[in-house]
Image (tube, rainbow, N blue to C red):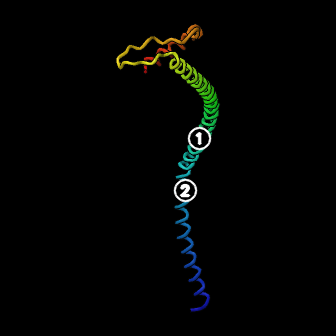
């Protein structure tokens, strides 16, 4: 065999391998073309989902800022109410202490265990200086004892 025949055989084998490879490549390209429509649909749905997610995030941010502003306002109101309640409680404690002090000074010493308690009264002209709330508080303190 001559060199020329050997070269022809080698070229024929390489061409056969190339034809086989091209057939496999052609089948894969055909499958890709068939799936191209599906891929376009998937990408379109993905884009739509991404847009909806962006819209949802924007709405959530807006709702969050509105809620935060309302919460800050409610916290401010709660702090004001807390301060008012602290003031009223402190004032009530002072009034109760003063009424208790007045009661202690106005009450005569009790000698019997079952002696009835007199109605709460302040000494002298102090009874006229007490408001209705103070008189009710005084009565409640007296009943508690």
At 54% across and 57% down in the image, what residue appears?
A: 30
Secondary structure category for the residue under label 1: helix
Furthest residue toward bottom:
1
- Horizontal arrangement in the rendering, residue 115 relative to residue 18 (left or right): left
Q: Where's the N terminus, which quadrant?
A: bottom right
At 53% across and 70% down in the image, what residue appears?
A: 20
At 59% across and 38% down in the image, what residue appears?
A: 52
Q: Is residue 70 visible?
A: no
Quadrant in the rendering for residue 117: top left
What label does residue 53 carry, if any?
1
- Horizontal arrangement in the rendering, residue 49 relative to residue 107 (left or right): right
Q: Which one is in front in this view, the residue at disc 2 or the one at disc 1?
A: 1
First in residue order: circle 2 vs circle 1: 2
Give the image location of residue 56, x and y in percent: 59, 37
Q: Residues within 10 Å of mark 1 (few under 14, many from 20)?
A: few
Give the image location of residue 31, x and y in percent: 52, 57
Furthest residue toward left:
114
Give the image location of residue 102, x and y in percent: 54, 18
Q: Residues within 10 Å of mark 2 (few under 14, many from 20)?
A: few
Give the image location of residue 7, x and y in percent: 60, 85
At 64% across and 34% down in the image, what residue appears?
A: 65
Number of numbered discs present?
2
Do residues under tags 2 and 1 come within 8 Å of each other at their CB atoms? no
In the depicted structure, whether residue 107 falls above or below residue 55: above
In the depicted structure, whether residue 56 falls above or below residue 17: above
User: Residue beneath label 2, please?
Assistant: 32
Q: Nearer the viewer, residue 136 or 31?
A: 136
Q: Where's the C terminus, which quadrant?
A: top left
Q: Is residue 27 visible?
A: yes
């Amino acid at each position: 065999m001559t060199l020329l025949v050997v070269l022809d055989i080698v070229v024929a084998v390489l061409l056969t391998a190339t034809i086989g490879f091209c057939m496999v490549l052609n089948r894969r390209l055909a499958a890709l073309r068939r799936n191209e429509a599906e891929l376009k649909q998937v990408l379109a749905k993905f884009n739509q989902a991404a847009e909806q997610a962006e819209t949802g995030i924007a709405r959530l941010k807006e709702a969050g800022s509105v809620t935060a502003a309302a919460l800050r306002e409610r916290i401010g109101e709660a702090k004001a109410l807390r301060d008012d309640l602290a003031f009223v409680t402190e004032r009530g404690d002072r009034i109760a202490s003063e009424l208790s002090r007045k009661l202690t000074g106005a009450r005569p010493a009790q000698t019997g265990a079952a002696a009835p308690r007199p109605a709460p009264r302040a000494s002298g002209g102090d009874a006229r200086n007490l408001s209705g709330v103070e008189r009710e508080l005084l009565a409640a303190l007296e009943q508690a004892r």
